[in-house]
Image (cartoon, rainbow, N blue to C red):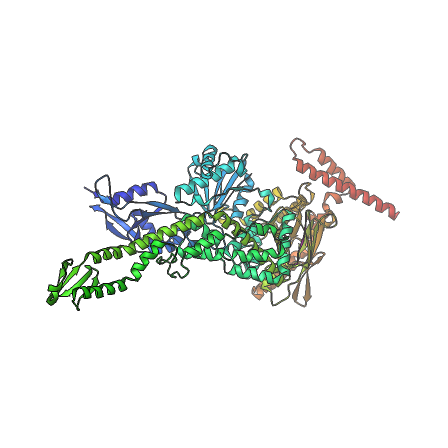
Amino acid sequence: MKEATPIRTQYLEIKQRHKDALLLFRIGDFYEAFDDDARVLAKELDIVLTSKPMGKNIRVPLAGVPHHSLERHLATLISRGHRVAICEQLTTEPVKQATGKKLIERDVVRVVTPGTVLEQGLLQTKVNNYIAAFKTDGKHAGIAYADVTTGEFAATEVELDAAIPELQRLAVSELLIAETDETNLKSFLTCFITKTDSDVFKFTNAKKTLLSHFGAKNLSPFGLDEWHLAVSAAGAIIHYLQGTQTNTAEQLTRLTTYTTENFMRLDAQVFRSLEVFESNTNAPSVLSVLDRTRTPMGGRLLRKWLRQPLLDVAEIVQRQEHVAWLIQNRKARAEIALCLERMHDIERLSSRARAGYASAQELLALGQSLELLPNIRAVLQQDTTRFSTLTKSLPTCDKAANLISKAINNELSLKANEQKGIIRAGFSEELDKLRDILRNGKTYLADLEQRERARTGIKSLRVGFNKVFGYFIEVTKPNLHLVPTDYTRKQTLVSTERFITLELKEYESLVMHAEERIEELETNLFRQVCREVGQSRQDILKSAATISMLDALISFAETAHDYNYTRPVVIDAPLLRIEKGRHVTLERALEEHDFVANDTAIGGDDAPQILVLTGPNTSGKSTYLRQNALIVLLAQIGSYVPAKKATIGLCDRIFTRIGLYDRIGSGESTFMTEMIETAQILHHATVRSLILLDELGRGTSTYDGLAVARSVIEFIHNHPKIKAKTLFATHYHELTELVSVLPRLKNLHVEIAERGDELVFLYKITEGVALKSFGVYAAQLAGLPRPVVRRAEELLNEYEERESRHSGKIRDIKDHPAHLKTSQRDELVEMILKFDLNSISPVEALMKLYELQNLAELEEEEKARVLRTA
């Protein structure tokens, strides 16, 4: 018969409530895992798997880690996709159970997941750690996200096809969805996905959760009256945090709503193609070039700005004005920067203080940081007109700063687990008295010894202490007849007797409990200080927001000054004009050489809508595409740009189809991936969009690819609702002949110089068409064996001759309807008459009408030419 121990029973009861998590069960100085959890823990942490008896005929697998190394091991477990339930000892002494047996009470205090991490060592300082929730009705989606370390909490509602790009933009660590949700998210997101009870997402339940959390009567203050899906998502986050975290949900004191229509929409493909956050080459990322921030808050805000470019000209200009002032006023900039260098992460530190997780060192760092706010405010007040808004949003938080200064000892031990002496002398009268008792103990005992010698006449009398018997008065046996009657015998030794008096006993009791009382009192006082600091958290968060903005703006100013960036003119029009534009990151990688700057004119009434760019591989076509997109991106976050001069029309979206890769997990080929992404562009682009297409159609046969590429260009050009600014780099030279039939298209090419058998890339973009692609030459540069290169040259000549002989078999670009002869036009009219008008789509009809219009215009031009000739 098997009979489990009480602690085993306790463990199983707690584990039953947390089946989906690894349960770390606190026993003394260790967190222990049992059964299957132990096997997982041993494997993931590479520690020994042992066993432990936990009842009669019961021995279970065991693995454990010391409590002081929990944070390090949590990082490993979370990074490998595990939920971890932390079970703590809630009492220091065993408590009598209903069974009559005594047992230390235990329960789970936190369930740690990627989106709910609080430990500083598990967080990236300059990266927000978002947990999000998603709810859809099949047409629209509600999205809410929160960072429990900073208190940020926001929600929105979007069309379903915009939901994934928005989640990609947020780069969430964990996503909550209803367990009945069948939306395909895993193919597009790399975050940890948690399925939870569908009832949590029901509107009525979520609304009740939000109203209870905020103590509100209705949802009007949050702007959520009409956004039921957003309410469902926001309520799900609060419910989840309340069920998995102690006090964490309380950090979310504000809920803001936003609309994606206020910002440029960017998806993961754009960030990857433009290497905004991570570089795939030796060049730095865009973020690493721009990021001069001194504080974690500033670093996080800069990332947010890059993910969310503005569509409001006034707001962009306001940021530019601040950058301009910071560039011109170097002394003021340096003064603010010096303060920022000494400032800690007040956003996260205040959150930890309010939640009761802050250490004394962290609270001291918070206080020292808050003391810098008046200095920064004083600098901003030098220009009250320009910085009036920032100054008003920068509370100096004097109350919290003064409290921390008075309460916390500024000479704390550097040991992370050393919490003695954290309260400053003079803050608590009781604490000071207790410390005096310990500090003056030796003096008291010496004084007592002298007094007792004088009173008893025993010159050899000694007052002593040992850990077993405590304090005592020791008298040699020859002097026992002099011992006063108020001495009580405590211990007999060979040559001496030890006594205690009422005074010494009282002192002993006082001293023995002083350290315990000091520790208890310091802990309570520290918690009190944290609570009072938490009451100032809204002001601290306001200050943190202003500090982060200043930090990011100074980063822009320093980058602009050091790298010769210029202030762009941002207007509300669908055009792009750039004079001597440069690539943000590539010019940093080529610092030893001059980067070749290039002009761009696209969109508007006086410039083409589509630029078709030809040139050899490695000649700079992709660089040209990317640099223009990056200049637009930088301009719309309020930064200066790498150009001599720039006029940027607001872009609602940047689309990129650059580079070849497979979605291996989805089973999609390179070409299918290319087509899916191109379809997304064509379905969502507008006249205010910027499209970058690089080598479209190269993933299939030559004529298939050419056909697709040409049809895409025609669609973008002719569609009445798109007409987006488009940069199209290609090796299909046939596409350059479209300039004769598409009036808003222009050909550009990359200049090269041929010197014998060698090519010299000039990286200069000029009007016209490249003579050829020089693919064989690129193969030679790549290091292909010489025999392979020679054979390729032979085959190329052979193919070109064959193409020339049989060109009539392939439909030439000039066979476009606009170039057909009269009899052929009649045939086209006959074909149009045969169209099934009940099935043709509106877009197809408009495209055909556009072709007919071109046909008529060219026919009139031909008639006019004939008349002039006659």
In this orientation, does residue 78 appear? yes
**Position of residue 185 measured from the top left corner of the image (x, y, whole percent):** 49, 43
Left or right relative to 229: residue 357? left
Q: Which residues are magenta?
A: 566-570
Q: Nearer the viewer, residue 742 or 310?
A: 310
Q: Is residue 765 above or below residue 113?
A: below
Q: Quadrant of residue 475?
A: bottom left
Q: Is residue 827 left or right of residue 361?
A: right
The one nearer the camera, 807 or 679, is 679
Check if residue 251 falls in the magenta segment: no
Residue 171 percent across, percent down from the top left = 50, 49
| Image location of residue 777, percent across then percent down | 62, 63
The number of numbered badges drawn on the structure is 0
User: Would you say 162 lies left or right of 462 here?
Assistant: right
Q: Residue 792 sits in which quadrant?
A: bottom right
Q: Which corner quadrant holds the N terminus?
A: top left
- Residue 743 position within the rendered picture, expressed as x and y whole percent measured from the top left: 74, 47
Name the foreground residue: 595 vs 619. 595
- Kindly tell me whether residue 660 is visible in this rendering: no
In the image, 573 versus 355, the foreground residue is 355
Left or right of 556, for residue 25: left
685 w.r.t. 381: above or below: above
Task: Kindly identify the residue that appears in the image at 74 percent across and 36 percent down.
Answer: 829
Q: Residue at horizontal 25%, vertical 56%?
A: 512
Residue farthest to the right?
870
Of all residues, the one furthest to the top in this rendering is: 838
Q: Main secondary structure of the magenta part?
A: loop
